[in-house]
Amino acid sequence: MTATRIRAALAAALLAVALAGCSSTPAGDGDDTPEASGSTPAATRRAALMVADSSLGEIVVDGEGMTVYMFDSDTQGAGASTCGGQCAANWPAVTTESEAPAVEGVTGEVGTITGVDGATQVTLNGWPLYYFVGDTAVGDVKGQGVNGVWWVLTPD
């Protein structure tokens, strides 16, 4: 096998694993136990929110420029996340240690809830926020539209 084919096979396998926990079923795999939301590099990023230009237009990103997403299976304003288990492994919560996360350019209402793992999860206009493990660099928006339930957010 050539190096290009090996890389392509590895990329396809990684994408298949990442998408496995992205169903519209609220807890992903039916298990509400968070598996990786507290241990992934994304979970340790700063939770400040700001606006960035992307291939999709102006979107909300964290303080380090990583794209944040909302999940259609959550209920806006419910004060709870429905993404646990394998879902949380693939879509780690955007967390903070502050009850009032810093924002820059974001005009929507920023708040917090207690996430499925007990950490303080950031919300925007009542939607819990998440990262996508497939986004590995600033500007990535690979989670947009996954399974028709994951979406980037606009600043308002």
Image: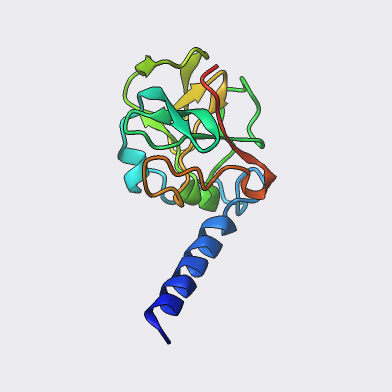
Q: Residue at x 49, y 12 (%)?
A: 107
For residue 131, side relative to residue 101 (left or right): right
Relative to 28, say whether 96 is above or below.
above
Judge whether residue 97 can be spotted in this image.
yes
* Viewer-proximal residue among 105 and 73: 105
Judge whether residue 99 can be spotted in this image.
no
Kindly give the residue lying farthest to the bottom in the view shown. Answer: 1
Q: Which residue is drawn at 52% across and 68% down?
A: 12
Indicate the quadrant containing the N terminus: top left, top right, bottom left or bottom right: bottom left
The answer to which quarter of the image holds residue 72 is top right
The tally of labels here is: 0
Q: Residue 29's x, y, as percent?
A: 60, 54
* Viewer-proximal residue among 35 and 61: 61
Q: Residue 35's x, y, as percent?
A: 44, 51
Relative to 109, say whether 79 is above or below.
below
Q: Which residue is drawn at 40% across and 23% down?
A: 50
For residue 124, side relative to residue 52 (left or right): right
Q: Which residue is drawn at 58% across and 59% down?
A: 20
The answer to which quarter of the image holds residue 148 is top right
Indicate the quadrant containing the C terminus: top left, top right, bottom left or bottom right: top right
- The image's colour scheme reads rainbow
* Viewer-proximal residue among 148 and 138: 138
Q: Residue 144's x, y, as percent?
A: 58, 42
